[in-house]
Amino acid sequence: MQMGDDEISDFNDFILSWIDYLNEGDVRSKWIADKMLDNAITLISDPQTMLDNARKYGDVHPELYVKYIETQNGIQDPQHLISVCQEAMDAIPVNCIVRAKVSLWYSKFQSDLHDDIKKKYGFIEAYRSETSEVNLLRILFFSQGSSEKEISMLKDIASTVKAQYPDKRSSYLYDDSNINALSDYDYYSILFWMGDISEMIQKGMKVKVGIGWSETFMKKGLAFLLLLLFEEDKYPKGILEILSGVERDFNLDNIIFGESEEKTKDLDKDIITVELLESLRTRVALNREDKEKLFKKIDKWIQLRVDAIMNANRRNYYHECAMYIAAFGEVQESNGVACAKQQILQRYKNLYSRRRSFIDELKWFGLRK
């Protein structure tokens, strides 16, 4: 480290030599080397030098391409940046998550140029390199509809990624956090948006007990089904809270990234989610018999959950239980079952008549008595 006020001569040459050293693999900790490299890159003032380093070390540190694109956005000509994005997408391995970031920048530049076909190509490549619910929803929402062939392709991508890393259970980091690996939770979410409801239930909603749901897909799966089955335009209290819970799983800024500001300035999560659900309903097209079967499953799951929470005296979950109960009644009413919400709220009040806090939660969601 330099001490004193004198400037280092040939500072840029020193930084380039330091970058070379960090990339030789002699530094004991890769994490420390990556942090040092990131800091060193920020000290390069010449854009061409930055791009040259991205090309030189892109196979080991593909994030160098992202750094160049981010710093040159709004400075360099969009066509040049598109060319760099395509170069990076070709050079970086498909299963590298950093490639997804480059692909989204590619889509953003294409969207600004009003090229929807190439924009969609970038979205799909981002999903291919980071197979996640958010990257899927971006395709489904901003691509003006997806054909059955495209839906099948997107599902195949998810199935392939899941098969490569079948033991990834949670959304936490895999052994290598830069490798595209799909958790069970995200995989089941993708199945839902693909319209594979039966497979989502079969694979993701197999629990036999009502405790420990926070470590499973059960809460989100139940929420998905309630939203799918709701048939009215105005969302009542229970369904609205279910909707908010689902939306907490994805960040609006993440979904709209890659699309032009002109098309996203008035968007919010509710608009995106509701339109996605409407599109899904047209593709799934459940008949009355299908719905009745799902109603029975939902009723059983809610009863399982509420009984377990009450037996374990988990008062902090009373509100959640009341939400599921109210939402299920609202779903039934939207499908023509008169007074279903009050009936199910009253039913659970009678079952747990000595649980005042729980009854207060039922009242909050609309219990009249």
Image (cartoon, grey):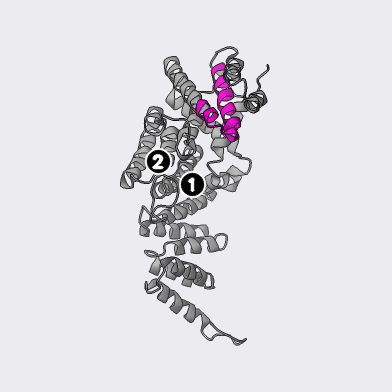
Q: Indicate whether residue 324 is drawn in magenta.
A: yes
Q: What residue is at 44 percent from the left and 60 percent from the top?
A: 84
Compared with 270, 181 (above or below) is below
Question: Which range of residues does the magenta coloring cover?
Answer: 307-333
Quarter-wise, where is residue 318 in the image? top right
Q: What residue is at 57 percent from the left and 44 percent from the top?
A: 252
Q: What residue is at 53 percent from the left and 30 percent from the top?
A: 309
Nearest to N terminus: mark 2 or mark 1: 1
Mark 2–mark 1 distance (CA, rounded to whole Å): 35 Å
Quarter-wise, where is residue 272 in the image? top right
Can the viewer see residue 167 in this picture? yes
Between residue 57 and residue 216, name the one nearer to us: 216
Amino acid type of the residue tagged 2 in the rendering: Asp
The quarter of the picture where the C terminus appears is top right
Q: Report the predominant secondary structure element of the magenta stretch.
A: helix
- Residue of label 2: 184
Crowding at label 1, few (<14), some or many (≥20) Cα neighbours within 10 Å? Answer: few
- Residue of label 1: 115
